[in-house]
Image (cartoon, helix red, strand yellow):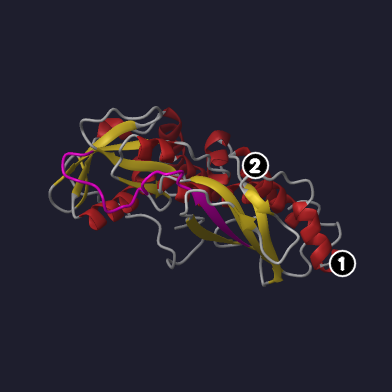
Amino acid sequence: MTDPTGPTVSEVGEFPTIARAVEGRRQPATTLVGPGHDAALVAAADGRVAVSVDMLVEGRHFRLDWSSPREVGRKAVAQNGADVAALGARPTAFVVGLGCPPDTPVAVLDGISAGIGEAAEEIGAGVVGGDLVQAGQVIVSVTVLGDLEGRAPLLRSGARAGDVVALAGRTGPSAAGLALLLAGNGDFPDLVAAHRVPTPDYPAGPAAAAAGARACTDISDGLLADLGHIATASGVAIDLEPRALAPGPRLAGAAAALGADPWDWVLTGGEDHALAACFPPDRPLPEGWHAIGRVYDGAGVTLDGRAHDGAGGWQSFAPGFSPGTS
Protein backbone atom coordinates (compact mmCIF):
# COMPACT_ATOMS: atom_id res chain seq x y z
CA MET A 1 0.00 0.00 0.00
CA THR A 2 1.24 3.49 -0.83
CA ASP A 3 2.37 5.57 2.19
CA PRO A 4 0.17 3.92 4.86
CA THR A 5 1.47 6.40 7.44
CA GLY A 6 0.30 9.48 5.53
CA PRO A 7 -2.93 11.43 6.07
CA THR A 8 -6.21 9.56 5.65
CA VAL A 9 -9.16 10.44 3.46
CA SER A 10 -11.16 11.59 6.49
CA GLU A 11 -8.31 13.87 7.54
CA VAL A 12 -7.92 15.42 4.10
CA GLY A 13 -11.67 15.62 3.39
CA GLU A 14 -13.94 14.64 0.52
CA PHE A 15 -13.61 17.64 -1.78
CA PRO A 16 -9.84 18.14 -1.36
CA THR A 17 -9.40 14.43 -2.15
CA ILE A 18 -11.51 14.84 -5.30
CA ALA A 19 -9.51 17.94 -6.23
CA ARG A 20 -6.29 15.93 -5.93
CA ALA A 21 -7.75 13.33 -8.30
CA VAL A 22 -8.49 15.75 -11.14
CA GLU A 23 -5.66 18.23 -10.74
CA GLY A 24 -3.53 18.53 -13.87
CA ARG A 25 -5.51 16.03 -15.92
CA ARG A 26 -5.65 16.68 -19.68
CA GLN A 27 -8.96 16.54 -21.55
CA PRO A 28 -9.50 15.68 -25.22
CA ALA A 29 -11.47 17.91 -27.57
CA THR A 30 -14.57 15.76 -27.02
CA THR A 31 -14.80 16.99 -23.42
CA LEU A 32 -16.89 20.15 -23.57
CA VAL A 33 -17.43 20.47 -19.80
CA GLY A 34 -15.13 18.55 -17.49
CA PRO A 35 -14.79 18.04 -13.72
CA GLY A 36 -15.93 20.75 -11.32
CA HIS A 37 -19.61 20.93 -12.28
CA ASP A 38 -22.72 18.92 -11.41
CA ALA A 39 -22.35 16.97 -14.65
CA ALA A 40 -19.89 16.73 -17.50
CA LEU A 41 -20.68 17.40 -21.15
CA VAL A 42 -19.10 15.19 -23.78
CA ALA A 43 -19.42 15.63 -27.54
CA ALA A 44 -21.04 12.76 -29.42
CA ALA A 45 -20.62 13.72 -33.05
CA ASP A 46 -21.73 10.27 -34.21
CA GLY A 47 -25.11 10.70 -32.51
CA ARG A 48 -24.64 7.39 -30.68
CA VAL A 49 -22.63 6.73 -27.52
CA ALA A 50 -21.12 3.39 -26.52
CA VAL A 51 -21.35 2.91 -22.73
CA SER A 52 -19.96 0.27 -20.38
CA VAL A 53 -19.37 0.05 -16.63
CA ASP A 54 -17.30 -2.25 -14.41
CA MET A 55 -16.48 -2.40 -10.72
CA LEU A 56 -13.37 -3.53 -8.86
CA VAL A 57 -13.82 -4.47 -5.19
CA GLU A 58 -10.85 -4.81 -2.86
CA GLY A 59 -10.39 -8.38 -1.72
CA ARG A 60 -12.52 -9.73 -4.54
CA HIS A 61 -10.97 -8.24 -7.68
CA PHE A 62 -7.67 -6.83 -6.43
CA ARG A 63 -5.36 -6.87 -3.43
CA LEU A 64 -3.27 -3.88 -2.44
CA ASP A 65 -0.48 -6.16 -1.23
CA TRP A 66 -0.23 -7.50 -4.78
CA SER A 67 -0.91 -4.41 -6.88
CA SER A 68 -0.06 -0.78 -6.36
CA PRO A 69 -2.96 1.70 -6.32
CA ARG A 70 -1.71 3.08 -9.65
CA GLU A 71 -1.87 -0.42 -11.16
CA VAL A 72 -5.42 -0.87 -9.86
CA GLY A 73 -6.41 2.38 -11.58
CA ARG A 74 -4.81 1.39 -14.86
CA LYS A 75 -6.52 -2.00 -14.72
CA ALA A 76 -9.90 -0.34 -14.21
CA VAL A 77 -9.41 1.66 -17.41
CA ALA A 78 -8.27 -1.42 -19.36
CA GLN A 79 -11.29 -3.54 -18.54
CA ASN A 80 -13.72 -0.74 -19.44
CA GLY A 81 -11.90 0.56 -22.50
CA ALA A 82 -11.72 -2.96 -23.94
CA ASP A 83 -15.50 -3.29 -23.66
CA VAL A 84 -16.25 -0.31 -25.91
CA ALA A 85 -13.40 -1.28 -28.24
CA ALA A 86 -15.10 -4.66 -28.67
CA LEU A 87 -18.18 -2.78 -29.89
CA GLY A 88 -15.99 -1.07 -32.48
CA ALA A 89 -15.86 2.25 -30.64
CA ARG A 90 -13.02 4.51 -29.53
CA PRO A 91 -12.98 5.33 -25.78
CA THR A 92 -13.50 9.06 -25.27
CA ALA A 93 -14.43 9.64 -21.62
CA PHE A 94 -14.39 7.95 -18.23
CA VAL A 95 -16.53 8.64 -15.16
CA VAL A 96 -15.13 7.26 -11.89
CA GLY A 97 -16.85 6.32 -8.64
CA LEU A 98 -14.57 5.59 -5.68
CA GLY A 99 -15.57 4.16 -2.31
CA CYS A 100 -13.28 3.63 0.67
CA PRO A 101 -13.18 3.45 4.49
CA PRO A 102 -12.49 6.83 6.16
CA ASP A 103 -9.13 5.62 7.49
CA THR A 104 -7.82 4.83 3.98
CA PRO A 105 -4.53 6.66 3.37
CA VAL A 106 -5.25 9.40 0.87
CA ALA A 107 -2.16 8.26 -1.03
CA VAL A 108 -4.07 5.12 -2.01
CA LEU A 109 -6.78 7.16 -3.74
CA ASP A 110 -4.14 9.45 -5.19
CA GLY A 111 -2.49 6.42 -6.78
CA ILE A 112 -5.73 4.94 -8.11
CA SER A 113 -6.77 8.30 -9.56
CA ALA A 114 -3.34 8.81 -11.12
CA GLY A 115 -3.45 5.37 -12.74
CA ILE A 116 -6.92 6.00 -14.14
CA GLY A 117 -6.01 9.46 -15.43
CA GLU A 118 -2.74 8.40 -17.02
CA ALA A 119 -4.25 5.35 -18.72
CA ALA A 120 -7.22 7.36 -20.02
CA GLU A 121 -4.99 10.08 -21.45
CA GLU A 122 -2.74 7.53 -23.14
CA ILE A 123 -5.68 6.33 -25.25
CA GLY A 124 -6.91 9.82 -26.01
CA ALA A 125 -9.76 9.91 -23.51
CA GLY A 126 -10.49 12.08 -20.48
CA VAL A 127 -11.68 11.52 -16.93
CA VAL A 128 -14.67 13.87 -16.95
CA GLY A 129 -16.23 13.36 -13.53
CA GLY A 130 -17.09 11.00 -10.72
CA ASP A 131 -17.95 10.58 -7.06
CA LEU A 132 -16.30 9.67 -3.74
CA VAL A 133 -18.20 7.87 -0.99
CA GLN A 134 -17.52 6.02 2.25
CA ALA A 135 -17.52 2.23 1.95
CA GLY A 136 -16.39 -0.84 3.85
CA GLN A 137 -13.47 -1.46 1.50
CA VAL A 138 -11.89 0.21 -1.50
CA ILE A 139 -14.25 0.08 -4.49
CA VAL A 140 -13.50 1.42 -7.96
CA SER A 141 -16.43 1.82 -10.37
CA VAL A 142 -15.63 3.13 -13.83
CA THR A 143 -18.02 4.03 -16.64
CA VAL A 144 -16.59 4.55 -20.12
CA LEU A 145 -18.11 6.36 -23.07
CA GLY A 146 -17.07 5.59 -26.62
CA ASP A 147 -17.48 7.01 -30.12
CA LEU A 148 -18.34 4.73 -33.06
CA GLU A 149 -17.26 7.45 -35.51
CA GLY A 150 -19.84 6.39 -38.07
CA ARG A 151 -19.14 2.65 -37.90
CA ALA A 152 -21.83 0.02 -37.35
CA PRO A 153 -21.55 -1.49 -33.85
CA LEU A 154 -19.98 -4.91 -33.49
CA LEU A 155 -22.42 -7.16 -31.64
CA ARG A 156 -22.14 -10.74 -30.42
CA SER A 157 -25.03 -11.80 -32.63
CA GLY A 158 -23.60 -11.32 -36.13
CA ALA A 159 -21.36 -14.36 -36.66
CA ARG A 160 -22.19 -16.62 -39.60
CA ALA A 161 -21.11 -20.11 -40.62
CA GLY A 162 -17.87 -19.91 -42.60
CA ASP A 163 -16.54 -16.87 -40.75
CA VAL A 164 -12.93 -16.77 -39.61
CA VAL A 165 -12.49 -16.38 -35.85
CA ALA A 166 -9.53 -14.13 -35.06
CA LEU A 167 -7.81 -12.77 -31.96
CA ALA A 168 -6.11 -9.45 -31.27
CA GLY A 169 -3.85 -9.92 -28.26
CA ARG A 170 -3.07 -12.94 -26.12
CA THR A 171 -4.97 -15.10 -23.66
CA GLY A 172 -3.43 -16.80 -20.64
CA PRO A 173 -0.78 -14.41 -19.25
CA SER A 174 -3.12 -12.73 -16.74
CA ALA A 175 -4.40 -16.04 -15.36
CA ALA A 176 -0.82 -17.28 -15.15
CA GLY A 177 0.16 -14.13 -13.28
CA LEU A 178 -2.66 -14.65 -10.78
CA ALA A 179 -1.59 -18.27 -10.22
CA LEU A 180 1.98 -17.11 -9.64
CA LEU A 181 0.85 -14.50 -7.11
CA LEU A 182 -1.25 -17.07 -5.28
CA ALA A 183 1.75 -19.41 -5.16
CA GLY A 184 4.19 -16.69 -4.10
CA ASN A 185 6.37 -17.41 -7.15
CA GLY A 186 8.37 -14.40 -8.36
CA ASP A 187 10.20 -16.07 -11.24
CA PHE A 188 7.95 -14.77 -14.04
CA PRO A 189 7.55 -11.01 -13.48
CA ASP A 190 6.28 -10.43 -17.03
CA LEU A 191 3.28 -12.69 -16.40
CA VAL A 192 2.57 -11.09 -13.03
CA ALA A 193 2.73 -7.69 -14.72
CA ALA A 194 0.20 -8.88 -17.32
CA HIS A 195 -2.18 -9.70 -14.50
CA ARG A 196 -1.67 -6.46 -12.63
CA VAL A 197 -2.12 -4.22 -15.67
CA PRO A 198 -3.68 -5.70 -18.83
CA THR A 199 -2.82 -3.92 -22.07
CA PRO A 200 -5.73 -4.20 -24.54
CA ASP A 201 -5.21 -3.34 -28.18
CA TYR A 202 -7.89 -0.62 -28.18
CA PRO A 203 -7.56 0.34 -31.88
CA ALA A 204 -8.10 -3.29 -32.88
CA GLY A 205 -11.84 -3.01 -32.23
CA PRO A 206 -12.48 -0.05 -34.53
CA ALA A 207 -10.12 -1.64 -37.08
CA ALA A 208 -12.16 -4.84 -37.00
CA ALA A 209 -15.37 -2.90 -37.53
CA ALA A 210 -13.85 -1.00 -40.45
CA ALA A 211 -12.66 -4.30 -41.97
CA GLY A 212 -16.15 -5.80 -41.95
CA ALA A 213 -16.09 -7.97 -38.83
CA ARG A 214 -19.54 -9.39 -38.04
CA ALA A 215 -19.18 -10.07 -34.28
CA CYS A 216 -16.71 -9.20 -31.54
CA THR A 217 -16.15 -9.64 -27.82
CA ASP A 218 -13.69 -8.65 -25.14
CA ILE A 219 -11.99 -11.65 -23.50
CA SER A 220 -12.57 -10.87 -19.84
CA ASP A 221 -14.04 -14.13 -18.50
CA GLY A 222 -12.01 -16.58 -20.59
CA LEU A 223 -11.71 -17.39 -24.30
CA LEU A 224 -14.16 -20.29 -24.27
CA ALA A 225 -16.70 -18.45 -22.13
CA ASP A 226 -16.65 -15.25 -24.14
CA LEU A 227 -16.67 -16.97 -27.53
CA GLY A 228 -19.54 -19.00 -26.09
CA HIS A 229 -21.49 -15.76 -25.80
CA ILE A 230 -20.95 -15.12 -29.52
CA ALA A 231 -21.92 -18.72 -30.39
CA THR A 232 -25.12 -18.48 -28.34
CA ALA A 233 -26.11 -15.00 -29.54
CA SER A 234 -25.39 -15.88 -33.18
CA GLY A 235 -26.82 -19.41 -33.10
CA VAL A 236 -23.58 -20.95 -34.40
CA ALA A 237 -20.74 -23.25 -33.39
CA ILE A 238 -17.11 -22.15 -33.09
CA ASP A 239 -14.17 -24.53 -33.43
CA LEU A 240 -10.71 -23.34 -32.40
CA GLU A 241 -7.39 -24.38 -33.93
CA PRO A 242 -4.94 -25.61 -31.25
CA ARG A 243 -1.83 -24.62 -33.20
CA ALA A 244 -2.98 -21.00 -33.29
CA LEU A 245 -3.40 -20.92 -29.51
CA ALA A 246 -0.49 -23.05 -28.32
CA PRO A 247 0.99 -21.71 -25.04
CA GLY A 248 4.30 -19.94 -25.50
CA PRO A 249 7.49 -20.76 -23.60
CA ARG A 250 6.77 -18.35 -20.74
CA LEU A 251 3.33 -19.84 -20.08
CA ALA A 252 4.71 -23.34 -20.42
CA GLY A 253 7.56 -22.54 -18.02
CA ALA A 254 5.23 -21.04 -15.42
CA ALA A 255 2.88 -24.00 -15.71
CA ALA A 256 5.76 -26.43 -15.20
CA ALA A 257 6.90 -24.49 -12.13
CA LEU A 258 3.41 -24.59 -10.61
CA GLY A 259 2.35 -28.04 -11.78
CA ALA A 260 -0.46 -26.48 -13.82
CA ASP A 261 -1.85 -26.96 -17.32
CA PRO A 262 -1.11 -23.89 -19.46
CA TRP A 263 -4.06 -24.72 -21.72
CA ASP A 264 -6.41 -23.94 -18.84
CA TRP A 265 -4.95 -20.43 -18.70
CA VAL A 266 -5.19 -19.96 -22.47
CA LEU A 267 -8.75 -21.25 -22.79
CA THR A 268 -10.42 -20.23 -19.53
CA GLY A 269 -8.24 -17.56 -17.92
CA GLY A 270 -9.80 -14.12 -18.03
CA GLU A 271 -8.65 -10.53 -17.74
CA ASP A 272 -6.20 -10.39 -20.63
CA HIS A 273 -8.76 -8.21 -22.41
CA ALA A 274 -7.77 -9.45 -25.84
CA LEU A 275 -10.44 -9.03 -28.51
CA ALA A 276 -11.94 -11.92 -30.47
CA ALA A 277 -13.95 -11.32 -33.63
CA CYS A 278 -15.58 -13.16 -36.51
CA PHE A 279 -14.69 -11.99 -40.03
CA PRO A 280 -16.17 -12.95 -43.41
CA PRO A 281 -13.83 -15.51 -45.04
CA ASP A 282 -13.27 -13.33 -48.11
CA ARG A 283 -11.93 -10.34 -46.13
CA PRO A 284 -8.25 -9.89 -45.13
CA LEU A 285 -7.69 -9.62 -41.41
CA PRO A 286 -6.62 -6.19 -40.14
CA GLU A 287 -3.11 -5.71 -38.82
CA GLY A 288 -2.70 -7.17 -35.34
CA TRP A 289 -5.34 -9.88 -35.79
CA HIS A 290 -4.55 -13.57 -36.31
CA ALA A 291 -6.89 -16.45 -37.15
CA ILE A 292 -7.64 -18.94 -34.38
CA GLY A 293 -10.66 -20.87 -35.68
CA ARG A 294 -13.81 -21.07 -37.77
CA VAL A 295 -17.55 -20.63 -37.37
CA TYR A 296 -19.83 -23.55 -38.30
CA ASP A 297 -23.49 -24.47 -38.16
CA GLY A 298 -24.32 -25.90 -34.77
CA ALA A 299 -23.83 -24.80 -31.18
CA GLY A 300 -21.07 -24.39 -28.62
CA VAL A 301 -17.31 -23.86 -28.68
CA THR A 302 -14.82 -26.67 -29.25
CA LEU A 303 -11.07 -27.10 -29.61
CA ASP A 304 -10.18 -29.16 -32.68
CA GLY A 305 -13.68 -30.60 -32.60
CA ARG A 306 -13.58 -31.59 -28.92
CA ALA A 307 -15.16 -30.01 -25.88
CA HIS A 308 -12.80 -28.71 -23.20
CA ASP A 309 -12.85 -30.81 -20.02
CA GLY A 310 -11.65 -28.11 -17.63
CA ALA A 311 -13.24 -25.06 -16.07
CA GLY A 312 -15.45 -22.91 -18.25
CA GLY A 313 -14.27 -19.46 -17.17
CA TRP A 314 -14.84 -16.81 -14.51
CA GLN A 315 -18.13 -16.73 -12.57
CA SER A 316 -18.87 -13.53 -10.65
CA PHE A 317 -20.59 -15.25 -7.71
CA ALA A 318 -18.29 -18.24 -7.36
CA PRO A 319 -16.63 -18.44 -3.90
CA GLY A 320 -13.09 -17.27 -3.24
CA PHE A 321 -10.80 -14.52 -4.50
CA SER A 322 -10.49 -13.83 -8.17
CA PRO A 323 -9.96 -10.61 -10.08
CA GLY A 324 -12.13 -11.65 -13.01
CA THR A 325 -14.68 -9.17 -14.32
CA SER A 326 -17.46 -9.17 -16.83
Residue 257 picture location, percent across and down? 46, 37
Q: Nearer the viewer, residue 79 or 159?
A: 159
Whether residue 79 can be seen here: no
| Image quarter of residue 150 | top left
Q: Earlier in the sequence, mark 1 or mark 2?
A: 1
Magenta stretch bounds: 140-163
Q: Secondary structure at mark 2?
A: helix
Q: Is residue 145 magenta?
A: yes
Mark identifier at residue 47? none
Quadrant of res 16:
bottom right
Within-10-Å neighbours for mark 2: few <14, some 14–19, many 20+: some
Residue 152 forms part of the magenta stretch: yes
Please tell me whether the stretch drawn in magenta is mainly helix, strand or loop.
Answer: loop
Q: Quadrant of the C terminus?
A: bottom left
Under tag 1, what secondary structure? helix
Spatial CA distance of label 1 from label 2 is 29 Å
Q: Which residue is mark 1?
A: 11
Quickly name the residue at label 2. Answer: 121
Any part of residue 40 in sight: yes
Q: Nearer the viewer, mark 1 or mark 2?
A: 2
